[in-house]
Image: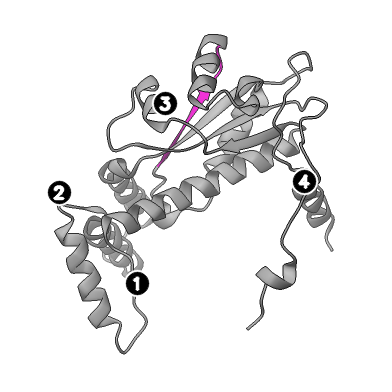
Amino acid sequence: MRKEAEVFDQIVQERRSVRIYDPEAEFDTDAVKRSLERAVLAPNSSNMQLWEFYRIKSDEAKKQVAWMCMNQKAAKTARELVVVVARRDLWKKRQQALVKEMQRVYPDAKSKQASRAMNYYKNLIPKYYWTDWLDLWGMLKKCIYFFAGINKPMIRHGNRADIRISVHKSAALAAQNFMMSMKAEGYDTCPMEGMDSKRIKQFLKLPRKAEVVMVIGCGPSAEGGIYSSRFRIPNSEVIFEV
């Protein structure tokens, strides 16, 4: 095993969801900044990067968001809170940015690679992300995929719910990058889904279509911050070879 793998294994083994943080221990807030910069390097669907991250730093803001997280200790005692937000509604803006990037990457617009990239981002991405009020386009896409997939492999997801899941998956990958980075920096984290996402959206003044994925508490662990020993279902029940 490579040395880098040994280091990574140690980080993975040591990462735990910590529920109580030490208010007196030294805390380098720049570690949060560095970890968020690593978070946005996470893989994501079509490189659309439909995510946002909000650092909750002031005492008053933390108090309010902790209340919206049901006053969990992981929120109340955290030195900072990070709100991970899925922004499916920003797909047009991200698409335009990626079209410009493809023009930079492939200056020869007539090349095969350029044509393929531009077709993907100019034509296929809008067909995938655009939705109407009743999601009739999504249902039509599902029907098309069904019949097109009778004799060959075919993407099956395409309605509004499928797109939401895809965007949330990408945001979760970034959140994991953040938590692993914080552990590498010497600090702990706790992802929380027990929250009032409506109130958090209002607090952050987010648009209607933005969705809060999770709130992550972070900081130096306090004694008793880990509630119990780690439990995992046996690998034989979850890891398979075909």
Real-space CA distance between mark 4 and mark 1, rounded to the nearest whole angstrom: 35 Å
Q: Are marks 3 and 4 in contact (CB under 8 Å)?
A: no
Q: Dot 3 corresponds to which residue?
A: 200
Q: Is residue 43 magenta?
A: no
Q: Is residue 55 magenta?
A: yes
**Residue 225 vs residue 210, the one in the foreground:** 225
Three-letter code, disc 4: Ile
Is tag 4's residue or tag 2's residue first in the polypeptide sequence?
4
Type of residue at label 1? Ile
Contact, mark 1 vs mark 3 (Cβ under 8 Å) = no
- Label 1: how many residues lie within 10 Å, few (<14), some (14-19) or many (20+)? few
Residue 11 — which label? 4
The CA span between labels 3 and 4 is 31 Å
Helix, strand or loop: magenta stretch? strand
What x and y, as percent, mark residue 131? 20, 52
Quarter occupied by the C terminus: bottom right
Residue 216 place in picture, x, y as percent: 58, 33
Image quadrant assignment for residue 222: top right
Residue segment shown in magenta? 51-58
